[in-house]
Image (spheres, rainbow, N blue to C red):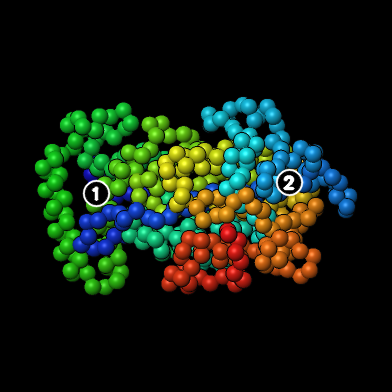
Amino acid sequence: MNRRDLLQLMASAGLATVAPLGSTARAQSAPSRHFVFVNAGGGWDPTSLCDPKGDAERADGRGPVNHYRADDIGRVGGTGIRYAPFPDPELATSTLRDDNPINSFDAFFQEVGPELLVINGIDTETNNHDTGSRTVWSGSDAQNQPALAALIAQAQAPESPLAFVSNGGYDYANGHIAPTRLSGTSVFRELSYPNRSNTSGDANLDNEQTYMLPDAVDAAIARARADRMATLAQQSGLPMRRAAANALFTVQGGDGSLSRLIDYLPSEVSNGLRGQAELAVAAFQAQVAVCANLTTGGFDTHGNHDRDATYRMAVLIDGVHHLWRSIRDAGIADRTTVFVGSDFGRTPFYNDGQGKDHWNATSLMAFGAGVAGGRVVGGTDADFSEQRIDPTTLQPTDEGGLRLRFAHVHRAARRLAGVADDSIVRAYPLDAEDLDIFG
């Protein structure tokens, strides 16, 4: 691969990040914590997952919130966690279209439930997709508000080339760090071995025929490039010129951390959300990433809600379950935290097309390092309207109380991540009280 092709590949992969001029280091020491943000794109229905209501008629005569029986709602023993029954038993034992087996809700909640925190009744203060996504994942509806993932990554590893890997969702960073947008794993093999003509999974990378240049020639080029960049570093005085030189240095240099990432990937990466999870865990194990965005869509169910939401919830929960098992099997569960959320909620009644429309009340699930699990905080009433909470107990109260917002959640999440006092994070204040949400 020539340099022009490499530059184009790097740009398309979002890897044109910044490294200090004159430095040959590509990755910092191992990040102390990792964070995964799983986005259910389109606006999920918490009453079909972690805030179940059942089929009782609403007082206003608009029909039931759900079509399943209240008696079928699942419970995690020893906790206050309740979850919707899996609406389609046949789907629970079938195979997803992307060849990933579905785990039922029971399997996920019974296994992860003791470590799971469910936050119900959060007011997104919007039913707009863009505003909702920004609010849920940054804590604010402000246009310039970086995602929490971006703030954590810049605080922990500002010079790591893959500090924040993203498969989509809200990953705006306001220039503080470059999200690495992913579209598969093959690009990492090509970037890891820039002097190889064939980096496919079947290629023998020790075969000299895969080299485009002899090792000695490649090493001489690398030394000459490093010398040239050192000279450029001394001559670059203006900030914009220095920033451009930084980017050039990054895309020209090799990165052993990428080959480490490849080493941790399974021999066959799964499709869909499971594959995103496997790539994120490999990046954590390789010590090149701090945060990862995972995403799956299809939750904007304005029609045929029960049919379509069933399938999308199955994909989501299967992927999240696989993510947690992968984290645990990798031995990094004690330093990895997972958040699962969506743009907003859906109406507590069905429209004429048996769909559900946009609704401001929603939920967030969290588990892993730093999260006191087996708990539910916040809440909604029988008609899925958010309830005010006691700021100490975080439980619904009839006497005053706070309206729980994502600004509250993110203030607590910043403290959980240890970045609340970072100078860049403090430049994005959140107007909310401090609540001990994560325990």
The quarter of the image holding the N terminus is top left
Question: Which residue is at 15% across, 59% downward?
Answer: 228
Is residue 379 or residue 317 the one in the foreground? 379
Q: Find residue 254 and name its label.
A: 1
Compared across the picture, whether 98 is left or right of 236 comes to right
Front of the two marks 1 and 2: 2
Query: What's the distance in space between the residues labelled 1 and 2, CA to CA?
Result: 51 Å
Under circle 1, the secondary element is loop
Query: Furthest residue to the front?
Result: 78
Other-residue count near label 2 (Cα within 10 Å), few / some / many at <14 / 14–19 / ≥20: many
Question: Which residue is at 55% across, 50% downward?
Answer: 367
User: What's under tag 2, amino acid-wise?
Assistant: Pro
Is residue 331 or residue 213 the one in the foreground? 331
Q: In this view, does 44 lie above or below 154?
A: above
User: What's under tag 1, amino acid-wise?
Assistant: Gly
Label 1 or label 2, whichever comes before in sequence order: 2
Q: Residue 324: horizontal and vertical position, in percent? A: 51, 42
Compared across the picture, whether 147 is left or right of 95 comes to left
Check disc 2 and report the residue beneath it.
52
Under circle 2, the secondary element is loop
Q: Residue 143: horizontal and vertical position, in percent? A: 54, 66
Q: Residue 32: horizontal and vertical position, in percent? A: 39, 56
Other-residue count near label 1 (Cα within 10 Å), few / some / many at <14 / 14–19 / ≥20: some
Question: Which residue is at 26% across, 73% downward?
Answer: 238
Q: Is residue 98 above or below residue 155?
A: above
- Do the numbered discs 1 and 2 sit on residues whose CB atoms are within 8 Å? no
Q: In this view, does 404 lie above or below 374?
A: below
